[in-house]
């Protein structure tokens, strides 16, 4: 819900200051309406239902994957599209992938979101409402800001939402913020007291190739980005995840693995190799053999590396696939209700 509107409405009604906290506590526990907030006076519940929408977002479509992943296409009150994902794992984790922007202005060549028209930054309440929708479905315990958008270009709202995530069940240490290398945001995140994790989308160690894949590299060169990441590590003492999408014949050779190992300090970085998920941009994912050879070479050179378990690929909910497009008819369920 719009927490600023909630606070102002309660103030205008002459309600005591603790009422806003009561409403938030119920919301964070996953209740579905004001009516369920039984320690609020009945008349107050009715008034809030009329004046403060329970969510800033409307669910337009829902898709459920065979692996238990759920993807939502949502819209803001002014019609901006965004997507959010719930990923379920066999070890019991319930992880959220949240969007920080509607669309993305940075146009990475392999990413479906980058092909969308950029809309705007999402507010803190719009970010939180993605998490709250899933909290009404199940308990949640992990969060990654790896949905639509560059989180560090909307850092004030990302941080404001992150401060409230522990109330929902997601601690700061289980929250990761991904960036393509937005240095001003990395430096600000370094100074923030919350122990959030940092993930760097890297995808190529060669500067020229990285600029082809990620135009932001021309603005913030990789060497400068790594220096900023190392300042983050020096302050936080938390290893940085490197996200590396495996693209067939583009960035997946054993020689390119060696280049990557040369620029990453194994005390600071751990590499997540991401099998490329199909989009409409004309690139193909690396073969499983190429991915394993790349991983093995990194390990041989002393750099920790894992291959990410892909979730939600059959409903275009996996890394790089979020584009706020129509969901497939056999996977999507149009729900047409508020979040």
Image (spheres, helix red, strand yellow):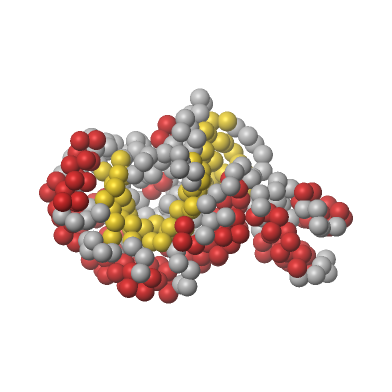
Q: Which residue is drawn at 36% across and 74% down?
A: 235
Where is residue 216 drawn, in percent x and y?
31, 59
* Vertical comparison of 61 with 30: above or below: above
Q: Residue at x 46, y 61 (%)?
A: 173
Q: Where the N terminus falls, by quadrant?
A: bottom right
Q: Residue at x 47, y 65 (%)?
A: 155
The residue most toward the right is: 43
Where is residue 120 drawn, in percent x and y?
50, 56
Q: In this view, does 10 lie to the left or right of 280?
A: right
Where is residue 86 drawn, in percent x and y?
51, 43
Residue 269: quadrant of the picture: bottom left
* Vertical comparison of 54 with 60: above or below: below
Q: Could you tell me if residue 25 is visible in this image?
A: yes
Q: Is residue 302 left or right of residue 315?
A: left
Q: In this view, does 303 lie to the left or right of 136?
A: left
Where is residue 190 drawn, in percent x and y?
40, 71
Q: Where the C terminus falls, by quadrant?
A: top right
Depth check: give the residue in front, 72 or 299: 299
Q: For the image shown, how many numbered marks are present on the structure?
A: 0
Q: Which residue is drawn at 47% across and 73% down?
A: 193
């Amino acid at each position: 819900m719009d927490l600023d509107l909630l606070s102002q409405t309660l103030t205008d009604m002459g309600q005591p200051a603790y009422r806003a906290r009561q409403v938030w506590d119920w919301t964070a526990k996953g209740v579905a309406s004001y009516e369920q907030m039984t320690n609020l006076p009945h008349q107050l519940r009715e008034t809030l239902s009329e004046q403060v929408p329970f969510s800033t977002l409307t669910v337009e479509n829902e898709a459920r994957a065979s692996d238990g992943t759920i993807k939502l296409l949502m819209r803001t009150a002014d019609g901006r599209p965004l997507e959010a994902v719930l990923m379920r794992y066999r070890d019991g984790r319930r992880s959220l992938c949240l969007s920080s922007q509607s669309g993305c202005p940075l146009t990475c060549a392999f990413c479906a979101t980058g092909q969308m028209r950029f809309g705007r930054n999402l507010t803190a309440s719009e970010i939180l409402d993605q998490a709250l929708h899933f909290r009404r479905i199940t308990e949640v315990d992990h969060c990654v800001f790896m949905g639509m958008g560059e989180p560090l270009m909307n850092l004030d709202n990302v941080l404001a939402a992150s401060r409230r995530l522990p109330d929902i069940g997601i601690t700061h240490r289980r929250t990761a913020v991904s960036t393509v290398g937005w240095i001003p945001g990395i430096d600000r995140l370094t100074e923030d007291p919350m122990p959030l994790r940092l993930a760097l989308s890297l995808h190529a160690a060669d500067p020229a190739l990285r600029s082809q894949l990620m135009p932001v590299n021309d603005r913030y060169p990789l060497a400068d980005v790594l220096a900023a990441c190392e300042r983050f590590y020096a302050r936080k003492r938390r290893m940085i995840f490197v996200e590396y999408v495996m693209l067939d014949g583009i960035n997946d050779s054993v020689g390119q693995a060696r280049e990557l190992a040369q620029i990453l300090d194994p005390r600071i970085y751990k590499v997540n190799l991401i099998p490329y998920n199909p989009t409409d941009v004309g690139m193909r994912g690396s073969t499983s053999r190429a991915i394993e050879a790349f991983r093995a070479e990194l390990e041989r050179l002393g750099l920790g590396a894992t291959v990410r378990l892909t979730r939600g690929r059959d409903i275009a909910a996996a890394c790089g696939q979020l584009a706020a497009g129509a969901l497939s008819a056999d996977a999507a369920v149009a729900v047409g209700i508020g979040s």
